[in-house]
Image (spheres, rainbow, N blue to C red):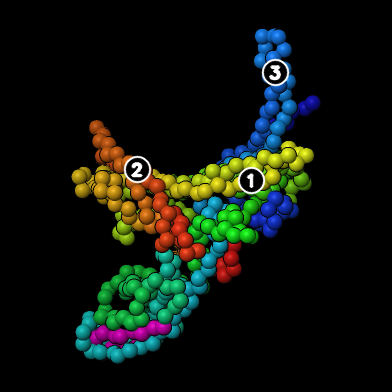
Amino acid sequence: MTITPRPGSQQWLGLAKETTYGTAVAAPTMWIPVDTPKWEAKVTPLVDQALRGNMGTDYGQTQGMRHDELTYKTMIYADTVFPHLLAILGGTDTITALTASTLSLGTTSTSGGTLAAGTYYWKVTATASGGEGIGSNEVTATTTGTTSSQILNWTTVTGASGYKIYRGTAAGAENVLVATVASVNTYTDTGTAGTAGAPPIAASYVHAVSLNNQSDATHTGQPNSYTGFLYQLDGKVVQIPGMMLGDLKFTFKADTLPTIDASWMGLPGVFINAPTNTPSTVPPMPPFTAAITVAGVLATQYSDCSFDIKRNNSAVPVLNGSQSPLAIFAGPLSVTGSLNAIYQGTSDADLTNLLTNTQPVLSVSVNQQNVVGQPLTLQASKITYDSAAPAGSNNSFATIASNFKALMNSTDALDGQRSPLQAKIVNAQSTSY
C-alpha cells in the first residue's frame, strides 16, 4: 500500500440548518473558514470484565452507543456568525427594519447658532443597538449672517433607539455627523462642528436572538439542529446530522483577529461524495472596530474580553436496534466570560463591581472593516463578577483580570421571559436566517 500525505489545508467545513431534527441536509448552505477542524466518532466501549479465575481484567469488548463531535476555531465573519448564535441560543431571528425617516425643515433663524451664511443640506438616519439605517430624504436651507440655526423635524422609525443628524454644503454630500440623539423627532442645528461621517447608502435590518424558553406540547426549548460537512481530503465528506452546538466562545483581543471556538455534538456521521466547495469571500471583523461598554459607558481600559456560551449537551441512549442515540439533547444554557484591563487603582470599576456586587450591563460590539453601522453586538444586561484580581509588574503596567457570569434577565429576552444574553447583527439581509 502506498501512503500519500494529504495537505490538511485542503479541508473545508460546511453547515446547513435542518428542517426536521436528524434528517441530514444534502449539501451545505454556508461555508465556514476554519482553523484546525476536528471530527471524532465517540464510541462507548463495553468491556467484558467478568471474573474467570485469572489475573487479567479485560476479556473482550464490544462497541456501545456512538455519537459524533465536531470542533473548530473560526474568525468572526458577517455571513456566518449569526447562524452560530441562533444555533446556541435557540431563539427566533427577530428582524427590525431600520427604514428611512421623512425629514422636513422647521424654522430657519438668523440667531441662536453659529451657522455662517450659505446653503446647507441635511439627512437623518435611525439607529438601534449600534446599527444605523439608510439616510432620509435630503432637505436644504440657505442661511444669512453668521449666527444662524436650523430646526429639523423627522418621522419616527419603528425599532429605532436614536437618530443621527448629518450636514453638508453640497447636494448628496452630507459628510459631517452633527449629532447623535436619543428617541426624539426634532433637532436644532446650531452649527456644531461635528465629526467626519456620512449616512449609509444601503438599507439596514437588525437581526436579534435570545435564549429559547418555549415549552408546550410542540416546543421543548430545543434549538434548531444542523448538518455538518467536513471534507476528508479524498473526495468524500463526513456528513453529520442532528448536530447541536454545545459551546460557542467569543474572544476579542487587541491586535488579534476576534475568534470563535465552536463545539458541536451530533448523530453518527456517514461518508458521502463531497458537494461543491463554495468558500466565503467575506473578510473577518478586525479588532480595532471593537467597543466594550460597561454600565452604559464606553470603556477604553480593556485589552481583551471573552464570552463563553455553553450548553450541557448529551446523547440520549435508547434500545433502538442500532448504535445511534435517539437524539442529541441540548441542555440548559449558561454564559460566562472574562475581562482583562489596565488596572486603575482603588477606583477601578471592575474591582468596585466585585466588592459591591454591582451587576452592570456589559455590551461588546465589533464592525466589519470599512462598513459603517453594521455591527455584531453581544449584550448581557446583568453580569455579576466572580473575581477581579489586580496584578503588578516589575517591567510593565499593572493589570486586572476579571471573570464574570451573565445572569438571566428580562431585558435581554425576546420571548417575554428571561435570557442571559441578547445577540444582534445589523446588515442588509431582509430575510431571517
Cα distance, mark 3 to mark 1? Answer: 32 Å
Residue 235, x across and y down, in percent:
75, 43
Compare residues 385 and 187 and report the one nearer the observer. 385
The residue range painted magenta reads 141-155
Mark toward the start of the polypeptide (1 vs 2): 1
Whether residue 201 sits left or right of residue 330 in the image: it is: left
Residue 335 belongs to magenta span: no
3 or 2: mark nearer the eye: 3
Q: Quadrant of residue 290?
A: bottom left
User: For the point 69% across and 36% down, which residue is it?
Assistant: 65
Mark toward the start of the polypeptide (3 vs 2): 3
The amino acid at mark 3 is Ala
Residue 146 belongs to magenta span: yes
User: For the point 57% across and 58% down, which residue is it?
Assistant: 215
The amino acid at mark 1 is Ile
**Residue that lies at the very extreme toward the right in this rendered image:** 1
3 or 1: mark nearer the eye: 3
Whether residue 54 sits left or right of residue 401 in the image: it is: right
Residue 26, x across and y down, in percent:
74, 53
Whether residue 253 sits left or right of residue 247 in the image: it is: left
Residue where numbered disc 3 is placed: 50
User: For the point 29% across and 49% down, which residue is it?
Assistant: 357
User: For the point 25% across and 36% down, which residue is it?
Assistant: 392
Cα distance, mark 1 to mark 2? Answer: 31 Å
Tag 1 secondary structure: strand
Residue where numbered disc 2 is placed: 386
Q: Quadrant of the C terminus?
A: bottom right
Residue where numbered disc 1 is placed: 328
Mark 1, Cα crowd under 10 Å, few <14 / some 14-19 / many 20+, is many
The amino acid at mark 2 is Asp
Name the disc covering residue 400, or none: none
Tag 3 secondary structure: loop
